[in-house]
Amino acid sequence: MAAKPDETKIAKLVRELLIELGEDVNREGLVKTPDRVAKALSFLTYGYRANVNEVINQALFTETSGGMIIVKDIELYSLCEHHMLPFYGRCHIGYIPDGKVFGVSKLARLVDVFARRLQLQERLTEQISKVVMEEVGAKGVGVMVEARHLCMMMRGVEKQNSTMVTSSVLGVFRDNLATREEFLNLVARK
Ligand code: ZN
């Protein structure tokens, strides 16, 4: 686990960055900006310092029905590691339990642990599926992330309406076509 970043040091670097960008760091609106940016960046990367076991906090419940559980539309906000610009969207998680299930809010908090750091959408999707698989001991897991990347929308190709979709399937979701299709159909339904 990473140490908490030195926000005073980050603020100094942000101040230098603003000067290099041609800003007057003494004008009223910018005086406190370096401190605010440091705090924001620290929060937006708290996932580096989060402990998955603490987040889950043994909130697993016994469940014997064995059907597929789907939690749709978990809000997701992250930063792309190439530009440090936000990408945001929704995450859908499905799994087939093997005797144990998560509390619903825990899944959302798990998503945040991996989203609150510099990320690639593909890696984020895989990390979520792996941790659900491992922590709940599921028979299979499917994760789909649909997100918009500001680095694509605001600059470069400026494809404002494109959404990137990534998925990761493990266990029976990978091995069994019918299970995978059931998951994809359920998350695609609006
Ligand atoms: Zn990017």
Image (tube, rainbow, N blue to C red):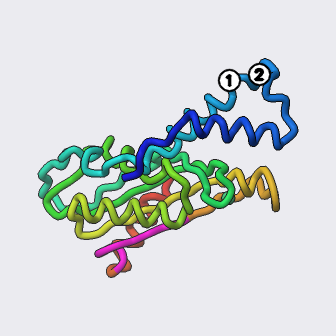
Task: Where is residue 76? Give x, y as percent.
Answer: 51, 47
Q: How far apart are marks 1 and 2 (CA)?
A: 7 Å
Report the magenta residues as a range.
Answer: 166-174
> Which residue is depicted at the point 51% across and 39% down?
6
User: To which residue does mark 2 refer?
Assistant: 29
Give the residue type at disc 1. Answer: Lys
In the displayed structure, would residue 174 be above or below residue 56? below
Residue 188 relative to residue 28: left or right: left
How many residues crowd mark 1 within 10 Å: few (<14), some (14–19), many (20+)?
Answer: some
Q: Can residue 112 be seen in this view?
A: no
The secondary structure type at the circle numbered 2 is: helix
The quarter holding residue 184 reads: bottom left
> Which residue is depicted at the point 59% across and 48% down?
88
> Which residue is depicted at the point 75% across and 25% down?
30
The secondary structure type at the circle numbered 1 is: loop
Q: Main secondary structure of the magenta part?
A: strand
Task: Where is residue 35? Give x, y as percent.
Answer: 62, 29
In the displayed structure, would residue 5 be above or below residue 136? above
